[in-house]
Image (spheres, coloured by chain):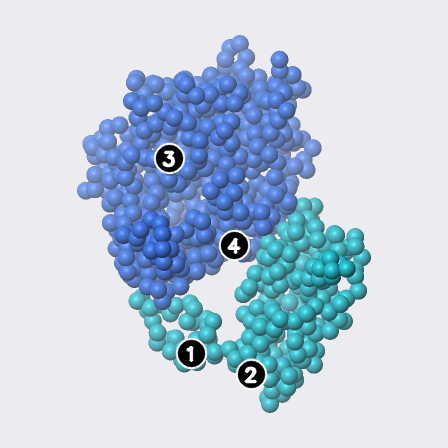
Chain colours: A cyan, B blue
């Protein structure tokens, strides 16, 4: 959503019929997100000391095949901006991201998030995971586990992990290493920005289940590509 | 010829809220219990998972979770002069079917009744006099319950903690609590969980109601505001406001239901056996007609079985409790001509319908972010919370903004004058969808000698047994009540800033083609007098003391509120008496 820059200042004065500030006005902030400016920050960093995002996440937001850094391309701007704010606040603990997020101004955050949200980037070719592990992951993702009372992931993360923007990130094509790592962060309480939902669920997953869902979601997109390329052959 | 099975201590006819509670308490007491459920087994995983569970066409429109009325319908008419016809499409009320019963697809709206509700007749005569009551309608047959609020309070408390109800107490042992409902009955302690977050529509309602001097409070909810481990050790999660609660099951372990509060423990107990797809045909009586010997049922393959049992709990949907009693010949059927007989007597319902408040386009409600019990309420017009002396009616309604999801097929608010189809209709829906607030009026339904349940003389079910026949229309008293409150609520809608406020209020005749409420109650009511009640104060059949008819069928008339929590409390109350008294010395718990 784009709103005039002045709206943030105006919001307090813009009262509804009952003196209620309408939620959209109050929540949207005053900055019209500028994806072009975001792209510059991603490529060059900021004068205030934030390094270029591209150093780890690549200019197109696909990061690298190590999976140490999450894929950001096409992730919702709302979600990305919230994560940056939470890194700065410590709701998500990260020795790498917290200082970077603190160095970004609110406008920087909005612009960088807007940029990555609009990037339509390819998926890197990755080594195929163990088929049985992927199958187990698919079961958890689509059905859940009656035994451990775990609901399926797609309830909230959308069909095949496509995401439920704006609030809920996509998992399809996300790196297995990152998914597993962030689930462990939830488990151990280093990530607290949706504690009562993801924190609770992550604690119910064992290591094997984490590896399985991570392996499954990583290959959701690449599976589609493989099918297509096989069709051409 | 029915195959006779080995005897057990107790059997429940239906495995929903009351059936699961009864079985749990009885196996705890060491009894061997069989649960007979006519529907299918189902669990949070895999049955309630998305995307399938968010299929609005399947669940909201085609009522996939409801009683299979191809096999067993209910016939309906407004009065005794009409011929009843089977309801082949559930609309007005939605009896559930399947493991967990209606306690799976409920909304989680979790109120207690008021102190006066349980002694309604005594209370009203004391406050207004017999003459006043007669003037409200000579046909009214309201009565006391035989149990008091104080007796039920510990059981309310226990059931709320089992469910993990999220709310804010307004009255703890007589001390008014800021932020809660100051008009509620006194409770012994705070709710187990804090209230749900208030959606924007609730915040607007709160402002409007407050500006008129009313007392808004957060609706108590069995969709949980935080992760919770109940006293049985079962873990529930926090509601994510997905907007698919009523008519759906919770995918997220966040709504209290047998599957999320009881069954994980009950099903592990070796003294419990669950049998699904089992349709109970009747309760069998011995030659004296004073003792039940068990039940006869048909399984999914069509085989007939006799299950002997020492205690029979009728734990079906209230309408089906009454039908089971009638089909089994337990208790004298009600005769509307003489007013004699008790089974089928005092069937009552719920008065609903409230205004629609159309707001300015600048106000974004986002009603799709919601749960089944997200409301902000007032109790200023509930029950007898206001002086009725000059009003010419009894009873009342709570008023609140409760929007439970605004799903796309069901929610198309358009102001009066909008064409019912076509381009202009589409434009109006697009204009108003996100800028409209619904207010609910929800309240009492008084019992009347004209309203009752009996067996239909014509229509039969898939097993050749008569369907239940419902004869019902709202008493004029209830219409006057609803219309009086409708005027008050229009004022609230205007105070909320509504550009257009479309007035609510119930009218006659009652119709089964529009959803109103699934709080069908009465028909096997509790009380102190066997002439006017089918069951005693412990919901034990007067005539056959080893049969207990648990649930909403025991309400002598309906209260202001959604009845689930009161059913839970009543059930715990009865089971407590069974555990502490009946099991030691089986027989009538109250002498007739």
- Kindly report which numbered mark, 1 or 4, lies closer to the viewer in this rendering: 1
Q: Are marks 4 and 2 on the same chain?
A: no
| Cα–Cα span, label 3 and label 2 | 60 Å
The one of A80 and B419 positioned closer to us in this rendering: B419
Q: Are marks 1 and 4 on the same chain?
A: no
| Cα–Cα span, label 3 and label 4 | 29 Å
Tell me what residue is drawn at x 43 percent, y 48 percent.
B410
In what element is the residue under mark 3? loop
Residue A37, labelled with which disc? 2
Q: Position of residue B428 (x, y in %)?
A: 35, 57
Which residue position holds label 4? B242
* Chain containing the residue with disc 1: A
User: Which numbered disc, 3 or 4, marks the residue that appears first in the sequence?
Assistant: 4
* Chain containing the residue with disc 2: A
Tell me what residue is drawn at x 35 percent, y 64 percent.
B361
In what element is the residue under mark 1? loop
| B95 relative to B7, above or below | below
Q: Position of residue B299 (x, y in %)?
A: 61, 24
Q: Position of residue A194 (x, y in %)?
A: 59, 63
State the residue lying farthest toward the top. Answer: B287
Q: Residues within 10 Å of mark 1 (few under 14, many from 20)?
A: few
State the residue lying farthest toward the bottom. Answer: A47
Tell me what residue is drawn at x 38 percent, y 28 percent.
B76
In what element is the residue under mark 2? helix
Q: Residues within 10 Å of mark 4 (few under 14, many from 20)?
A: some
> Which quarter of the figure is the C terminus of chain B placed in?
top left
Which residue position holds label 3? B512
Q: Are marks 1 and 3 in contact (CB under 8 Å)?
A: no
| Cα–Cα span, label 4 and label 2 | 35 Å
């Amino acid at each position: 959503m784009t709103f005039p820059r002045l709206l943030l200042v105006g919001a307090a004065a813009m009262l509804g019929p009952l003196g209620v500030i309408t939620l959209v006005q109050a929540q949207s902030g005053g900055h019209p997100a500028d994806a072009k400016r975001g792209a510059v920050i991603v490529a060059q960093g900021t004068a205030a000391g934030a390094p270029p995002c591209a150093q780890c996440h690549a200019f197109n937001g696909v990061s690298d095949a190590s999976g140490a850094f999450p894929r950001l391309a096409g992730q919702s701007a709302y979600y990305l901006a919230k994560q940056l704010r939470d890194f700065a606040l410590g709701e998500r603990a990260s020795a790498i991201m917290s200082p970077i997020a603190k160095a970004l101004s609110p406008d920087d955050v909005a612009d960088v998030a807007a940029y990555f949200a609009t990037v339509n980037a390819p998926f890197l070719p990755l080594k195929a995971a163990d088929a049985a592990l992927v199958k187990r992951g698919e079961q958890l993702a689509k059905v859940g586990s009656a035994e451990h009372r775990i609901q399926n992931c797609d309830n909230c993360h959308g069909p095949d992990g496509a995401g439920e923007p704006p609030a809920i990130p996509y998992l399809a094509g996300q790196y297995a290493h990152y998914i597993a790592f962030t689930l462990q962060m939830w488990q151990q309480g280093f990530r607290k920005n949706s504690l009562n939902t993801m924190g609770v669920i992550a604690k119910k997953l064992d290591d094997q289940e984490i590896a399985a869902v991570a392996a499954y979601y990583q290959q959701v997109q690449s599976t589609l590509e493989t099918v297509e390329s096989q069709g051409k052959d | 010829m029915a195959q006779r099975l080995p005897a057990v201590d107790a059997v429940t006819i239906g495995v929903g809220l009351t059936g699961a509670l009864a079985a749990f308490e009885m196996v705890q007491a060491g009894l061997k219990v069989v649960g007979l459920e006519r529907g299918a087994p189902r669990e949070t995983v895999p049955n309630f998972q998305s995307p399938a569970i968010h299929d609005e066409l399947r669940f909201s429109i085609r009522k996939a979770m409801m009683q299979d009325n191809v096999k067993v319908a209910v016939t309906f008419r407004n009065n005794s002069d009409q011929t009843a016809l089977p309801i082949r499409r559930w609309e007005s009320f939605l009896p559930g079917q399947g493991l967990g019963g209606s306690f799976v697809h409920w909304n989680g709206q979790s109120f207690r009744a008021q102190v006066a509700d349980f002694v309604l007749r005594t209370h009203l005569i004391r406050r207004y006099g017999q003459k006043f009551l007669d003037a409200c309608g000579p046909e009214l047959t309201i009565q006391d319950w035989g149990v008091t609020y104080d007796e039920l309070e510990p059981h309310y408390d226990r059931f709320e903690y089992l469910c993990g109800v999220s709310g804010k107490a307004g009255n703890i042992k007589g001390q008014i609590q800021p932020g809660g409902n100051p008009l509620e009955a006194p409770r012994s302690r705070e709710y187990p969980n804090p209230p749900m977050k208030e959606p924007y529509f609730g915040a607007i309602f709160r402002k409007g109601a407050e500006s008129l001097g009313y007392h808004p409070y957060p609706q108590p909810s069995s969709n949980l505001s935080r992760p919770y481990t109940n006293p049985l050790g079962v873990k529930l999660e926090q509601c994510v406001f997905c907007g698919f609660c009523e008519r759906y099951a919770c995918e997220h372990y966040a709504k209290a239901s047998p599957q999320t509060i009881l069954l994980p423990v009950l099903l592990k107990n070796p003294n419990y056996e669950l049998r699904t797809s089992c349709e109970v045909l009747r309760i069998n009586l011995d030659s004296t007609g004073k003792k039940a010997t068990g039940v006869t049922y048909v399984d999914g393959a069509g085989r007939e079985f006799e299950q002997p049992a020492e205690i029979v709990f009728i734990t079906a949907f209230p309408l089906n409790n009454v039908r089971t009693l009638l089909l089994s010949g337990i208790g004298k059927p009600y005769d509307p001509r003489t007013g004699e007989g008790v089974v089928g007597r005092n069937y009552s319902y719920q008065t609903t319908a409230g205004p629609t408040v159309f707001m300015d386009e600048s106000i974004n409600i986002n009603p799709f972010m919601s749960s089944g019990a997200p409301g902000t309420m007032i109790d200023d017009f509930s029950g007898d919370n206001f002086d009725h002396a000059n009003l010419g009616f009894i009873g009342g309604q709570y008023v609140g903004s409760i929007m439970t999801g605004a799903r796309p097929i069901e929610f198309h608010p358009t102001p009066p004058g909008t064409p019912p189809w076509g381009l202009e209709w589409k434009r109006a829906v697009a204009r108003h969808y996100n800028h409209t607030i619904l207010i609910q009026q929800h309240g009492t339904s008084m019992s009347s000698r004209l309203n009752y349940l009996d067996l239909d003389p014509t229509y039969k079910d898939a097993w050749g047994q008569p369907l239940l026949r419902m004869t019902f229309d709202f008493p004029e008293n209830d219409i006057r009540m609803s219309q009086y409150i409708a005027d008050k609520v229009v004022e609230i809608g205007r105070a909320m800033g509504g550009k257009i406020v479309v007035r609510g209020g119930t009218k006659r005749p009652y119709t089964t083609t529009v959803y109103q409420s699934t709080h069908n109650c009465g028909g096997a009511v509790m009380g102190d007098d066997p002439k006017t009640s089918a069951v005693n104060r412990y919901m034990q059949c007067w005539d056959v003391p080893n049969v207990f008819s648990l649930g909403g069928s025991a309400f002598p008339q309906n209260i202001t509120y959604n009845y689930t929590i009161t059913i839970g409390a009543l059930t715990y109350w009865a089971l407590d008496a069974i555990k502490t008294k009946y099991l030691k010395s089986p027989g009538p718990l109250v002498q007739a």
